[in-house]
Amino acid sequence: MIAASPFTALGLRPEIVRAVVEEGYTIPTPIQDKVLSEVLAARDVIACAQTGTGKTAAFVLPLLERLAESKKPRGPVRVLILTPTRELATQIAERIAAYGRYTGARHAIVFGGVNQRRQEQALSYSPEILVACPGRLLDLMHQGIVRLNQVEHLVLDESDRMLDMGFVPDVRRICSVLPKERQTLLFSATMPPGVASLARAMLTNPAEVTVTPPATTAPTIEQSVVFVSKADRRVLLERILADSKVLRAIIFTATKRGANRLAEQLSRAGIESAAIHGDKSQNARDRALNAFRNGEQRVLIATDVASRGIDVDGISHVINFDLPNTPESYVHRIGRTGRAGATGEAISFCDPGERSLLTQIERLIRQRLPVNKSMPSVPAEAHSDAAPQPMREQRPHGYEQRPQRAPGQDRGQPAPRHPHAPSGGRPAHFQPKKRSDSRSYS
Ligand code: AMP
């Protein structure tokens, strides 16, 4: 089984393939297929693939292999993985533990918002792999607790976010202490042009791996828009959540206050939820995400802090209560569903004042969002104004229109075939996943 695995053919040792097989992976995903050999050949890589298509394993597996190959004694950090959020750092560390369980590679994780002592302790065990959020890592560097002068491999996960204005000063400071001779790997599902040139400047003769063009949404996600006024959308949301087909939903709001307010309003309507955003303590963030992962809470209300990377099985719906301000966030938000070949639905509310945001999103993803025709109606007494609902669609023109569904296909039919699938809607490389499966990751 291990010898015959395609992961063995890609150049991974039996200890790693065994762990991968135990995870239930039989075939590498396209991004894994393309990236593994480049990383093993010591090349820099800039990789773009849709959300939920196995990017984490695409860099963790070959880096575990490279660590195991090298005969260097244990001691310094040799792999540094930078990520924008604490939740994502935790998730990557869990994947390293799972894929590396037979190689003996040690890893540690550092991020802010929690006491530093346990992280110091973990660093004292000489991890070879460090997963970090930039702020806390810089603190630890300044205190002389972590040294990065022997890093051989740097990964920027969600690299467009890591290189945007919020993070780039910290990332530059960290990079300035790394050895110049190193392998650098950049991964994301989106790559705005301004950031792409900065990204390329960090790399030496990189292999550019694009499974799909940047910002391509997964075909397993059924996307739609509902034109609804801000005044009506909460009642509409309650109606949607009352539907039993909404098994597990993330609702995205624009602001932290908006997330808190919505959680309170839903609670008054008898819908319990967990909320996650940057003003919550790390403990509260962990509690909310865990309750959502293990199925105690069916609804998670989140700001964009939870839009990237988070991999929770069985999210049937993503609802954009507010449209995101940056179109890339749309791709990441809806990418919380339709992962690993499962199907999911993404519904975006759009108030008349948000039309330009919708246009930007549709331009980025190169498709027009169909209007959702199966929305429950909002009772007249719930309207704060006399606006008819759902509103009539009025769309701007001048961009390519690519329908989400195949010609002749209506809502009741399955999603279009995945480009990699031999038949049906599920890509060949993914095992079917059950919606009810509440593992924190697979
Ligand atoms: P990622 O894009 O790295 O967050 O991965 C998305 C999901 O795909 C995770 O739940 C992984 O466990 C799963 N996954 C990654 N690689 C494979 C594979 N080769 N076969 C099946 N599932 C996979």
Image: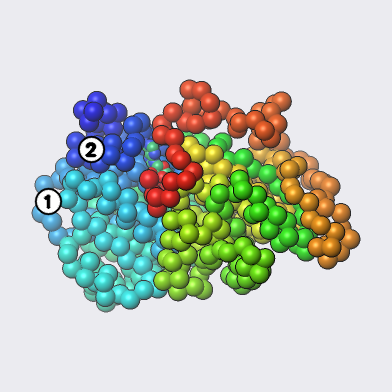
Going by the numbered disc 2, the residue's amino acid type is: Arg
Q: Helix or strand or loop: what does disc 1 sit on?
A: loop
Cα–Cα gap, marks 2 and 1:
24 Å
Q: Residue at 37% x, 55% y: name it.
A: 91
Asked whether, in this view, residue 238 is left or right of residue 390, the answer is: left
**Can residue 205 be spotted in the picture?**
no
CB under 8 Å between discs 2 and 1: no
For residue 364, side relative to residue 4 (left or right) = right
In the figure, 284 relative to 92: above or below? below
> Residue drawn at (51%, 73%), measured in percent from left and top?
279
**Disc 2 marks which residue?**
18
Q: Is residue 165 above or below residue 364?
A: below
Location of residue 412 with respect to 61 vertically, above or below:
above
Q: Position of residue 362 (x, y in %)?
A: 67, 45
Q: Quadrant of residue 89?
A: bottom left
Earlier residue among tags 2 and 1: 2
Query: Which residue is label 1 attached to?
Result: 72
At which x and y percent is residue 258?
A: 64, 69
Q: Residues within 10 Å of mark 1 (few under 14, many from 20)?
A: few
Ligand 1: give its quadrant: top left
Q: Quarter of the image holding residue 232?
A: bottom right
| Label 2, ligand 1: CB separation under 8 Å | no
Residue 298 location (% of width, % of height): 54, 56
